[in-house]
Structure formats: C-alpha cells, structure tokens
Image (cartoon, rainbow, N blue to C red):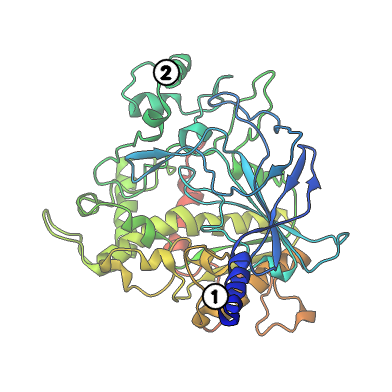
C-alpha cells in the first residue's frame, strides 16, 4: 500500500472513530453500575435510557427501579411508552419509564450544577424524551445538567376511575365514550383489562359536531380520591392548590406563543372545521344560569374572535382569516388564558419572582408552524411548541447560522433562570432586562426579532375570558 493510500486510510479511520460513540467511565448508581457515552463533539456525557421505575400492572402506580450487577450500557434513549402513530398504528414498550441525563464535560467532578428537568409534551397522549426532539446541544454547554423523562401516556397513564385499581374520576364519561353502558367503575375496569394495548391506545373520542374545543385529549391528570393503602399523587385540583397557596413557593417562569391555536386547529380535518359553531364551542368548564345567558356569551365570543368575518355556509371552505381567528379561540381558551390566570394566582400567594413571556418570533426553526397546511403556513408568529425548537437541539433538524442569535438568547435566559432564579441578572450585562411581573401593572417580555414588553392581559379577548371565568366557572 502506498504512502498516500495509508494516509487516507488513517484519516478515514480517525473520522469514522469520531462518529462512533466513545464510552464514559463506569459510574455506580443505586440500581447498579452504568456506562454512558461521550458526545461526538466532546462537549458532554450522556446516560440514556436509565430505568427509574418498573411497570407492574396496568393503571397502577409504578414499582421500584430495577437493579443489576453487570454494567448497564445507557445508550438507548429512544424507548417510548405505548402510543398511536397517525391513529392507526400502536408503538412503544411496556417498560418505558426511563430518563436521560446529559452532563457537561468541562466541569470538575465535585462541581454542583443546576439541573434542568424536562417532561415532554404531547397532550398526555403522545411523546417521548429522546434527543430526536429534546437534545442537549444548546443547553448543557452553558453549565447545566439536563434530564429528560418518559412517563406513561394516554389511557395507560391517565385512566381515572377513582377506585383502587385505577384511581380517578371519569367513569361515567368513559362509559359513554367506549359505548359501555354500565356506570359501575369496576365493570369498566374489568372491561379495560380485557382489551389489548392496541385496542386501548387506538380508541379515539369522537368530537361532537360543531364543537371547536379538542375532545381527543381525554386521558389527562385528575384529582384523585384518597384510597386506603394507596399513595396519591394529586388529591386537589391545581386551581384550588393555587388559590390556597398550598404549594412549594419558588421563582416561576411562565409563558406561551402568540398563535398557540394554529397548530391545534391545523390538526383538525376540514369537514369538522367547516361545521364549527360558537354556540357549541363555549368552554365546557363554564356553567351558566340559563340557556339565554350561554347564547349571549357565544355571540360575544363570536364578535370578539371573528371581528366581522362570517362563518362559512354549508359546503363552503374556511378562509385563511376565519381559520386564524377560530384558532385563536382554541389557543387562548386552552393555553394562553390559563397561563395568565395562573400568573395572577401566583402573584397573590407567592412572594418569589414571576417572569412572563410571549414568544412570537417567526424563523426557520418554527417547525410546527412550517409543517402546517399551506392555508395556515404563511401566518406570521409562533404556534404551539415553536419556542421549544430554540431551546433544545434536534437530531433531525440542522442548526442554521440564521437562527443562532435567537437560540443563544433563549438558552442563555433559560439557563440563567436555572442558575440564578433570574433570566437576565444584572451582572451578565443582558442586552434587554426581563423584569419580574408585578400585580399593579403586570407585563410580559415579548420575544421577537426585537425584544419588547407588553401588558400581560394583551387583548380584549383574554380580558373577556377572565370576566367569564370570574362569573361562570363550573364548581367542582
């Protein structure tokens, strides 16, 4: 072999070796010995797929973490819990309760670093914690440890029947949804236990015609009933907990995107969206003294949200303007307004700083916005989860130089909050100061090409929602 060929062989071998994951030293956990890998760029170690609990039986609390004697190679971060893909195919594994730990390499062994823990999104019915979407590349080099966590989703994680076998409170609703007439939760439990995982996960709740508010997200966290011998997780509604101030009081950063509802609206089929009516889309957690009052509220919501645009006639297609305006009802009722109300309650019961933000930057990493139908794709702003793509790296989405500034700004503020409880501490000389929210004139940081501030209650629509919930919130 000639000298030139040998040189290229050596270079190719070095390049190939760089692509292969290099192992870390073995560390000892309470589970047993664990070995992770070093990232290809040498910036961090990663311990992926570490089991933190076991699943013993459907609908039951998890068991203790498994143990082992031989070295556990923590390299599989792509395990996920049972869920459906496109509502037709089930995927996942039973023993899916794993976490991934990413640790910066440029620190001393005894350094105490802040830990950022992320529970993935997906509406409680889909998702997983892997680096395909929630990678550490942007966060960990800033001196934090990142932990991402799997949890059971859909009916496997959130069936609520308020009995020992499935603690919760949706038995009568499930009876109707599953076309199972018995109101006895034990009959329902036995029914669910006889179904295969695919039968359970692929069951979809039909939305009532004309109802804009999503009904597919049926299995969500609930306030549990106290059952002897069972350790509950949550026995009071989050609203009651916030009102009474019965929670761990710490600094809080809370916010959302300015067009949250666009993604939710785009997920609906065209036939359903053409049949939407405001009368049937009044939020279900409101209770009115009469049908006339409900109709008045529906008409006021229609005036505020449609701004003069007409709803389509039978067989007509929604215009882009009408689609955007309807999507705002979905986003503001389901996401934006609850965050604003939570802020008000926190300001009353928590003396620690509260920081609010509104993300409305429109860039090349607004992946949910870019993936929407052509009718909605050109709408400027940010929809549900767009902000996530400027905080986490993704395996399948390359980083472009055009978005580096926003990635740097977002990750700096988020890691500063983890380190100091303040996203823009003075000693870091921030280009823009993010002030804590106050109860007198509450404001939020608007994250865009140019940062600014805006009133927390940013339009007449969310102000009207506040008025509605103060008068008509359903009790119990």
244 or 51, which is in the foreground? 51
Q: Which residue is denoted by mark 2 in the rendering? A: 194
Percent across and percent down for residue 113 are: 80, 61
Percent across and percent down for residue 434 are: 66, 75
Is residue 437 visible in the rendered image? The answer is no
* Classed neighbour count for the residue bearing mark 2: other residues with Cα under 10 Å, few (<14), some (14–19), many (≥20): few
Q: In what element is the residue under mark 2?
A: helix
Which quadrant would the N terminus be assigned to in this image?
Answer: bottom right
387 or 28, which is in the foreground? 28
Q: Which residue is denoted by mark 1 in the rendering? A: 446
| Residue at 32 percent of width and 69 percent of height | 377
For marks 1 and 2, give the CA distance.
51 Å
* Classed neighbour count for the residue bearing mark 1: other residues with Cα under 10 Å, few (<14), some (14–19), many (≥20): many
86 or 334, which is in the foreground? 86
Q: How many marks?
A: 2
Reply above or below: 65 against 190. Answer: below
Extreme-front residue of the structure: 1
Percent across and percent down for residue 171 are: 45, 24
Percent across and percent down for residue 374 are: 26, 68
Q: Is residue 354 left or right of residue 386?
A: right
Residue 79 figure quarter: top right
| Residue at 77 percent of width and 60 percent of height | 114
Q: In what element is the residue under mark 1?
A: strand
């Amino acid at each position: 072999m000639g000298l030139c060929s040998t040189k290229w062989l050596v270079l190719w071998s070095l390049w190939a070796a760089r692509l292969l994951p290099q192992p870390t030293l073995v560390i000892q956990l309470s589970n047993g010995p664990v070995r992770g890998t070093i990232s290809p760029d040498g910036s961090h170690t990663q311990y992926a797929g570490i089991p933190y609990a076991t699943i013993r039986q459907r609908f039951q609390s998890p068991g203790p973490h498994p143990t082992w004697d031989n070295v556990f190679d923590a390299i599989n971060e792509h395990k996920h819990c049972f869920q459906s893909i496109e509502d037709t195919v089930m995927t996942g594994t039973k023993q899916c309760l794993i976490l991934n730990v990413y640790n910066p390499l440029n620190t001393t062994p005894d350094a105490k670093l802040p830990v950022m823990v992320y529970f993935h999104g997906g509406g409680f019915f889909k998702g997983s914690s892997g680096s395909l979407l929630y990678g550490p590349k942007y966060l960990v080099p800033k001196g934090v440890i990142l932990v991402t966590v799997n949890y059971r989703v859909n009916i496997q994680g959130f069936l609520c029947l308020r009995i020992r076998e499935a603690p919760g409170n949706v038995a009568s609703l499930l009876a109707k949804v599953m076309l199972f007439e018995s109101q006895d939760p034990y009959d329902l439990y036995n029914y669910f236990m006889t179904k295969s995982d695919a039968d359970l996960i692929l069951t979809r709740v039909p939305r009532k015609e004309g109802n804009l508010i999503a009904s597919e997200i049926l299995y969500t966290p609930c306030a549990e009933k106290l059952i002897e011998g069972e350790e509950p997780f949550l026995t009071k509604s989050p609203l009651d907990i916030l009102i009474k101030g019965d929670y761990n009081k710490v600094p809080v950063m809370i916010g959302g995107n300015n067009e949250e509802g666009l993604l939710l609206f785009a997920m609906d089929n065209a036939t359903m969206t053409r049949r939407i009516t405001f009368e049937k889309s009044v939020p279900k957690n409101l209770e009115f003294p009469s049908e006339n009052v409900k109709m008045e509220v529906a008409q006021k919501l229609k005036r505020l949200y449609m701004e003069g645009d007409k709803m389509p006639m039978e067989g007509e297609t929604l215009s882009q303007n009408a689609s955007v305006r309807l999507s705002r009802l979905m986003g503001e009722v389901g996401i934006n307004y609850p965050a604003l109300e939570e802020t008000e309650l926190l300001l009353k019961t928590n003396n620690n700083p509260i920081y609010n933000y509104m993300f409305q930057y429109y860039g090349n990493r607004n992946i949910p916005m870019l993936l929407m139908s052509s009718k909605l794709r050109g709408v400027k702003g940010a929809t549900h989860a767009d902000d996530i793509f400027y905080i986490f790296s993704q395996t399948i989405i390359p980083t472009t130089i055009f978005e580096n500034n926003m990635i740097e700004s977002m990750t700096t503020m988020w890691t500063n909050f983890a380190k100091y409880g303040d996203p823009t501490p003075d000693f870091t000389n921030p280009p823009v100061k993010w002030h804590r929210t106050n109860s007198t004139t509450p404001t939020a940081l608007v994250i865009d090409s140019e940062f600014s501030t805006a009133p927390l209650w940013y339009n007449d629509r969310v102000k009207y929602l506040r008025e509605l919930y103060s008068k008509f919130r359903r009790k119990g």
